[in-house]
Image (cartoon, grey):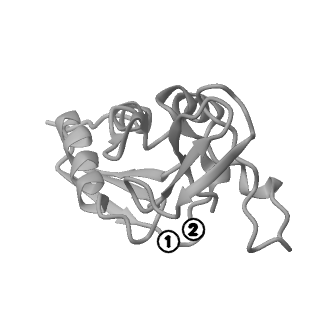
Amino acid sequence: MVSTFPAESAVWDALISVTDPEIPVVNIVEMGMVRGVEIVGGRATVRFTPTFSGCPALHVIRQDIERAVAPLGFETVSVETVINPPWSTDDITAPARAKLEQYGIAPPDPAGESDPFVTLELSPVSCPRCGSFDTRMTASFGSALCKRMYVCNACKEPFEGMKSV
């Protein structure tokens, strides 16, 4: 009897169900965290890059990847962390940016659009509720290390914004 295992596309489809534990409206594929999938025999290997190396949710993401892929029938599911190249806000897809904004988190500007010589100033952040750029940062860290706290001076609403990397 010859064993057959699912195609790589089935693994990618399964990974779409893995959400970021700290931002459950986006999945790890659209956040650009999945770097690759490899299938060799009965072994599926998923390579992923964390958005923040000190993220306390890394172990949860690894477990969620294994849980999503294991039901496909592979003999072994391996999750490898890839840190080079590092994750960048450029890796976030346009649909994920829209989801972040709808969720009330100001999506980061793509890193490629920022001025590499400006290191101490933050780019203007638009309010995800009213769209105003008349905002100010109130704390360097939000509910997660990868977010900052802001308040909009126009609509007076507080909100979180993702840090650009």
Name the residue nearer the viewer: 165 or 123.
123
Q: Report x, y in % for residue 8.
A: 42, 39
Q: Secondary structure at mark 1?
A: loop
Kindly identify the amino acid type of the residue bearing the numbered disc 2: Pro
The vertical placement of 79 against 109, above or below, is below
The label on residue 18 is none
Name the residue nearer the viewer: 163 or 27.
163
Crowd rating for badge 2 (residues with CA inside 10 Å; few <14, some 14–19, many 20+): few
Residue found 64% across the figure and 35% down from its top: 127
Residue found 24% across the figure and 46% down from its top: 64
Number of numbered discs overlaid on the protein picture = 2
The vertical placement of 8 against 50, above or below, is above
Residue found 60% across the figure and 28% down from its top: 98
Q: Report x, y in % for residue 106.
A: 59, 40
Direction from residue 64 to residue 163 in the image, left or right:
right
Q: Secondary structure at mark 2?
A: loop
User: Where does the N terminus fall, quadrant-wise?
Assistant: top left
Find disc 1 in the rendering and name its residue. Answer: 83
Name the residue nearer the viewer: 61 or 1.
61
Q: In the orientation shown, which residue stands out farthest toward the left?
A: 1
Q: Report x, y in % for residue 152.
A: 62, 39
- State the CA–CA distance, disc 2 to disc 1: 5 Å
User: Where does the C terminus fall, quadrant-wise?
Assistant: bottom right
The vertical placement of 156 against 122, above or below, is above
Quadrant of the rendered structure where residue 119 is? bottom right
Direction from residue 163 to residue 72 in the image, left or right:
left
Crowd rating for badge 1 (residues with CA inside 10 Å; few <14, some 14–19, many 20+): some
Kindly identify the amino acid type of the residue bearing the numbered disc 1: Ile
Q: Report x, y in % for residue 49.
A: 47, 61
Find disc 2 in the rendering and name its residue. Answer: 86
Residue found 44% across the figure and 61% down from its top: 50
Q: Assess whether mark 1 and mark 2 are in contact (beta carbons under 8 angstroms).
A: yes
